Image (cartoon, grey):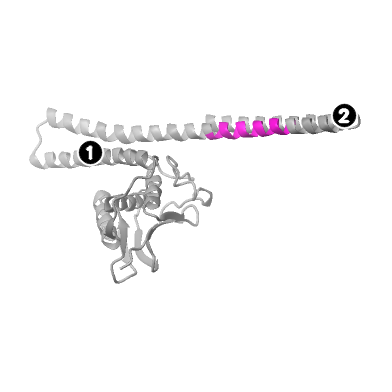
Amino acid sequence: MTRRQKAIAFFVALCVLLVGAALSLNIGWIVITAERARLRVLVFGIITFGLIIAGLIIYTVFLVLEIRRNEEHDTFINAVTHELKTPIASIRLYLETLQSRTLNDEQRRGFYEVMLADADRLTRTVEQVLKAGVASQKPKVIPRAPVDISTLARECVDLAVSRHHLQLGAIALESHDAGPLMVRGDAEELRTSLTNLLDNAVKYSSDVVRVTVSVAAPSPDTVWVRVQDRGVGIPRKQLKRIFRRFYRVQTRGLKQVKGTGLGLYIVRSIARAHGGRVFAQSEGEGRGATFTLELPRLAS
């Protein structure tokens, strides 16, 4: 148990004790003075004690929420710091090696590829933080244009395979409708949403990545994009929490996963801005997870 968890447990226990003491005093006072006290005084005392108890409960709830918020903020800062420091240190090391040693062309190309990959990682981290900041503000006006979600899904799958250096077939794309599935929205925002879902599926997979992306129209007015992995899974109690900002899945034996805890929060924000939603399903730890992005279908 962490120090903050101990603090939360302490304040909750303190609140329970104080409420119990207040109730005991109130009941004892009523029993002792009921026969000789006026009804008006008795009612006033009951209301006063009730307000004190309500105040204690509200204070404790807000205190616990603030402690949790601070803990999430610290976790986010640590994650972002790691995501920034690691590629910077790597780039610096390769640059120092290039400066101090004589390398052949093949070695140089290898170094350049690694540094470009680290630069891309830095860019993605900065973009995630910026998008999360925009998502937490007032909803912005999204430029609306027809987007073929099937084509967009194919582009995102190809990008994920290339970015994570996966074998062909590691991410399978299935389309359950013959015609194009069109939605109205911002193609770049929707690409970010699908990319985040695919990145999560790969990161939380086991040693062998097996991800299935399904594009379908379950109804004439709706388009679904489902991303299913066979990874560590999600405990059912956490299914509604995973879309919160900074929240990260907590399971037993989970390997260290890189990230800022902002990906699913951004996905939910983009889905809502497009008039849709996103939800997760999982049978529990070790049984994989399925994320469904649901968007309004553009009438043909």
Residue 134 located left or right of residue 18: left
Dot placed on the residue nearer the N-terminal end, 1 or 2: 2
Residue located 35% across and 40% down the image: 134
Residue 74 located left or right of residue 185: right
| Residue nearest the observer in this picture, 293 or 260 | 293
Mark seen at residue 119: 1
Judge whether residue 166 can be spotted in this image.
Answer: no
Task: Specify the quadrant that holds the N terminus.
Answer: top right
Mark seen at residue 147: none
**Which x, y percent locates residue 284?**
50, 54
Badge 1 local density, few (<14 within 10 Å), some, or many (20+)? some
Task: Specify the quadrant that holds the C terminus.
Answer: bottom left
Residue 185 on the magenta span: no
Mark seen at residue 37: 2
**Which x, y percent locates residue 168?**
25, 59
Judge whether residue 169 can be spotted in this image.
Answer: yes
Rendered position, 154 above or below 87 = below
SS at mark 1 in the image: helix
**Which x, y percent locates residue 119?**
22, 38
Of badges 1 and 2, nearer the viewer stands: 2
Residue 215 located left or right of residue 49: left
Badge 2 local density, few (<14 within 10 Å), some, or many (20+)? few
User: In the rendered structure, which amino acid carries the disc numbered 2?
Assistant: Ala
Q: Residue 15's image quarter?
A: top right
Residue 24 located left or right of residue 199: right
User: In the rendered structure, which amino acid carries the disc numbered 1?
Assistant: Ala
Residue located 42% across and 55% down the image: 277
The range drawn in magenta is 49-65
| Residue nearest the observer in this picture, 71 or 203 | 71
Q: How many numbered marks does the figure carry? A: 2
Residue reaching furthest front? 40
Rendered position, 174 above or below 257 = below
